[in-house]
Image: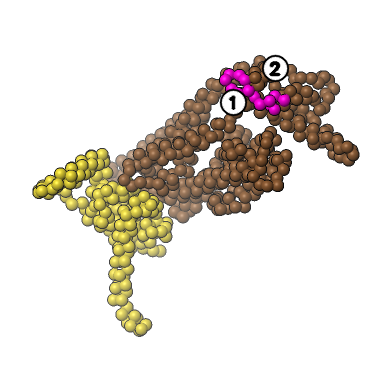
Chain colours: A brown, B yellow
Amino acid sequence: MSNVQDFEEKERERKVRRKVFYLTFATLALIFGGFLLWKLSSLILPIIVGCLLALAFRPVKERFRIRWLPHEIQVLCSFAAIGVVLFFAFNTFRKHIPDEEQKLEFKVRLKYKLNDRYRQLVAKSPEGKSNAVAALLEKELGPLMDKINQVLTLNAEERNLFLKYAAGYSGKPPIQSKFVDYFRANQTTGKYVIPEETPAGTASPTAPAAPTQPPAAEEGTSLESKFSAWILAPLIFLFLGFDNGQIRRFFISLVPNRYFELSLTVLDRLDDAIGRYLRGTLIECFLVGLTLALGLILLGIPPGIAVAIGVVSGLLNAIPFLGAVIALVIGVSYALIAEDVRPLIPGLNPNDLALYVVILVVIAHVLDDVVFQPFVLGGAVNVHPLVVVIAIIAGSLIMGLWGMLFAIPTVVVVKTAVETFFKELKDYRII
Amino acid sequence: MGAPAGQNFLIEPAGQSRFNGLIPMSARKFAADKLLWETLGRWKRSSPELDRIQFLKTVPFFDQLSNRQLKRVSDITFERTYQTDELIFEEGQPGAALFLILDGKIAIEVCRETSTTRLAVLETGAFFGEMALLDDTPRSATARALERTRTLALYRNDLNGLVYRHPRTACRIYRSLATMIGDRLRSTNELVQMKTPADTAGLG
């Protein structure tokens, strides 16, 4: 009997020791984890992006499995294939990122075209019929146009550079004479609303040029650190691709026996729901981008630029509501400066390109709401519109554009996790 | 039900060399290459993994699988250790996995309002909870460890995943499962017929 009592006593002591050990270990892990999170906060986003991409692309890896090829080689091949696709997409996109000359040309064109259209809009008709409307427009839009002109006016340095490029500079062909004419015409553009205190004239160009130097240097260093942090995303994507269930097995091995089947089920359901949502969103963004790109090509915009606008708008479509607005701004800005547009659809007036772009963006987003979303996402994850709006605002306050982009996926992950966890806890009669 | 004692997985039985007789050079080379890769493959695997494959070989559920296929099954199983009196699963909980007893002893029990009936005691090499491989209907009984027991758990969705990755392996496992369920149904039918011959005769 005494032996049994001794054994029970020892077991009790062991239980106490185990509890103390687990508590100490958990506290230390929490403190250390919190410290790491605080110190390495810049790494969180790349890690999340890498993990989400790996989750989204896993079915591709599973589907294109070649049985006789080792797993690691298959992963490397699929990673290389994705890399090649991304490289070509980025290269196509980069061609349309303007260099210094094109930026100057873009500013000149945009200023000229905007002023031209504004003047057309507020021009008084010979009969004087629309005078009241024109006056109202002039009153409302005048100050805005002045602000836009202030932003788009070239400073002395930029003007010199433009004139150099116009004559042919650093081995580049000279700027078209049409744009040089625009440049000259821009010089004569005055203010639409005469200010009371300061006389109108050319904007003081040298003053803002000086303080731009230090931020440029800061930008360089922050870009470098951002780049080094973002290297993590493809690395995590690659190593999670190599993983053949070992990470899951490790975490499951930590779970107490009582919750073993429960944790397997919860993990699986979460994995399935989040993966489906991510893939659905990616496909939806792709379809919206494709619709916009095809529409812009039909409207006569060069295919390269149409695809570039489609890619950006498609990616930004992941942000509900705001994505459509940004797509609209990008599309209309290009439509305003577009030259020699020949729409592929007969009967369209190239002068009304901006209006057609607005209609196209509206059509793309109606299609998205009515066809793509129900078809691709299938209402798998229903989030109330109010929650969507609050999440986007909260995301933007916390992490800016990235926060907005990741607000909805985060809400979906948390919602699915909480729902699944509580349902399974009840099914397994734990609560 | 246990693993055959003394069987060495790495060593080929004596007198069964692949190079006996008049075998063409190309076939010999092929056989030598195959042997080399097989040996390297075995050497790569860790010893617990080898033990697990050895064990799986002895389970009737997997008797139609080759070594390579057994390795695939071994890769998706989870090893769990239960202490005496610890519950493996409870009656009424949704089923998610099949359990194989690596070593130890477990009891299958059904709890009623006032009493607990022990249906069976299972030992090394036996398996239980196989219906969970088909769907998540509630467990029909409780499984309790009678001593310190090591088990291998095979999760339903991992087996479903095997259908896409290695369809032949999954197909053989499902065939074993179907055969086993068919046998049970047949024996249950026989039992019902034996117990109620008058009723069944009356129905006709």
- Indicate the secondary structure of the residue bearing disc 2: helix
The residue drawn where x is 66% and y is 43% is A343
Q: Position of residue B72 (x, y in %)?
A: 31, 48
Label 2 crowd bin: few (<14), some (14–19), many (20+), radius 10 Å: some
Q: Residue furthest right?
A: A127
Q: Quadrant of the N terminus of chain B?
A: bottom left
The residue drawn where x is 23% and y is 41% is B37
- Was residue B163 drawn as part of the magenta stretch in this picture? no
State the mark number for residue A156. 2
User: Can residue B64 be seen from the camera position used here?
Assistant: yes
Q: Position of residue A290 (x, y in %)?
A: 57, 44
Q: Which segment did they paint magenta?
A: A168-181
The residue drawn where x is 63% and y is 39% is A301
Closer to us: B169 or A338: A338
- Indicate the secondary structure of the residue bearing disc 1: loop
Closer to us: B166 or A175: A175
Left or right, residue A129 beside residue B143 = right
Question: Where on the picture, by quarter, is residue A358?
Answer: top right
Q: Is residue A380 above or below residue A195?
A: below
Label 1 crowd bin: few (<14), some (14–19), many (20+), radius 10 Å: few
Amino acid at circle 2: Ala
Mark 2 or mark 1, earlier in chain? 1
Left or right, residue A373 beside residue B126 = right
The residue drawn where x is 42% and y is 58% is B136
Q: Position of residue B181 (x, y in %)?
A: 32, 64
State the mark number for residue A213. none
Residue position for label 1: A99
